Image (cartoon, rainbow, N blue to C red):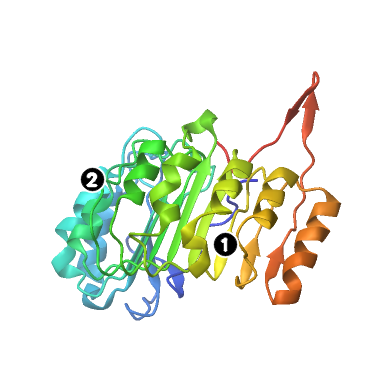
């Protein structure tokens, strides 16, 4: 599976592409949309670089009302980091007083494969925008998230083909008292995803995340081990949604969930894209659905067997 579409909705707002220079398109109300600012990743000499696009945006739109920004591509995103974009956004903080949400790296595979996207330390965005409620990042190459405290962040999403253990630990060390939704795509070691359940310990304890209601540990090649850790995690008791989708979950991981602490209080358990047997899929639904839990066990996968070796794959990789 690959990510097949650019964002259409972000921060509960329709995404609107900021038009090219000279376009006659009528601009929407600044607060009514999430503005998408994107430059070609394989640029020609005549293409407008992202930094120039952003300056044109600031000069064209009444940015005092802008609530959400979606950063698409930038030139050579597979080789050039997002640092200049983060710096530009930080420098413009006084021009964007209403900004509540940023998505950094809304690219498809034809723009840049997810595991090739070069990111940077993205926490200056949180420092510059104390009102920021949503931060989403796609790609983990050179991604850094040194621990900090942010009073307003409610939603943090990091989509990767492989999330380094150091980044997982640093996110777990952040104090985010308002965070309600944490979504980490842990990935595979092939693309830098070397975390273990021990690296998730601070997150699973929930100590620094008192408001957390949705925990998504997705797209993980060691999903069984993650499920086993979640089964006894203190944070689970206060969740309304648990998401272990897009990974390599087998009957072993599902058995650990059923044998662990009760999860009948959940509103939703998302296991989409899994390697469960039909019997286990039926068993976990039968155990939880009567309690009102919406259990998603769609998209069952079949392992590849090559030369006697069984291979299971995450939904998103390169």
Frontmost residue, 85 versus 194: 194
Residue 266: % across, % down: 60, 70
Residue 186: % across, % down: 50, 43
Q: Residue at x 61, y 73 (%)?
A: 267
Q: Quadrant of residue 130?
A: bottom left
Residue 162: % across, % down: 49, 38
Q: Is residue 87 left or right of residue 308?
A: left
Frontmost residue, 121 versus 71: 121
Q: Residue at x 27, y 44 (%)?
A: 121
Q: In this view, does 141 lie to the left or right of 280?
A: left
Label 1 near label 2: C-beta < 8 Å?
Answer: no
Q: Quadrant of residue 144?
A: top left
**In the orientation shown, which residue stands out farthest toward the right?**
279
Q: What element carries label 2?
A: helix
> Label 2 vs label 1: CA separation?
35 Å
Frontmost residue, 301 versus 6: 301
* Residue 241 seen: yes
Is 135 rendered above or below residue 146? below
Is 86 rendered above or below residue 153? above
* Residue 139 seen: no
Instruction: Give the residue at mark 1.
Output: 242
Instruction: Give the residue at mark 2.
Output: 84
Q: Which residue is drawn at 56% across and 50% down?
A: 218
Q: Which residue is drawn at 64% across and 64% down?
A: 269
Q: In which quarter of the image is residue 120?
A: top left
Q: Is mark 1 on a helix, strand or loop?
A: strand
């Amino acid at each position: 599976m690959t990510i097949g579409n650019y964002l259409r909705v972000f921060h509960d707002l329709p995404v609107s592409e900021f038009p090219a220079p000279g376009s006659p398109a009528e601009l929407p109300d600044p607060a009514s949309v999430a503005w998408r600012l994107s430059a070609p990743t394989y640029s020609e000499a005549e293409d407008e670089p992202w930094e120039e696009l952003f300056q044109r945006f600031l000069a064209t739109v009444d940015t005092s009302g802008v609530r959400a920004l979606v950063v698409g591509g930038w030139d050579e995103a597979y080789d050039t980091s997002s640092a200049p974009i983060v710096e530009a956004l930080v420098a413009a903080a006084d021009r964007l007083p209403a900004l509540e949400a940023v998505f950094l790296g809304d690219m498809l595979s034809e723009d840049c494969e997810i595991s090739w996207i070069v990111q940077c330390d993205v926490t200056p965005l949180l420092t510059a925008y104390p009102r920021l409620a949503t931060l989403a990042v796609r790609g983990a190459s050179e991604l850094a998230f040194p621990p900090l405290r942010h009073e307003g962040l409610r939603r943090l999403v990091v989509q990767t083909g492989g999330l380094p253990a150091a980044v997982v630990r640093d996110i777990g060390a952040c104090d985010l008292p308002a965070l309600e939704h944490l979504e980490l795509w842990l990935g595979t070691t092939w693309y830098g995803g070397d975390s273990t359940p021990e690296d998730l310990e601070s997150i699973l304890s929930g100590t620094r995340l008192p408001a957390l209601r949705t925990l998504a540990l997705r797209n993980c090649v060691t999903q069984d081990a993650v499920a086993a850790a979640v089964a006894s995690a203190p944070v689970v008791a206060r969740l309304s949604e648990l998401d272990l989708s897009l990974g390599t979950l087998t009957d072993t991981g599902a058995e650990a969930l059923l044998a662990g602490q009760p999860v009948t209080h959940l509103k939703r358990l998302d296991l989409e894209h899994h390697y469960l047997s039909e019997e286990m899929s039926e068993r976990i639904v039968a155990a939880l659905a009567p309690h009102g839990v919406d259990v998603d066990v769609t998209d069952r996968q079949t392992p590849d067997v090559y030369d006697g070796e069984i291979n299971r794959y995450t939904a998103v990789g390169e």
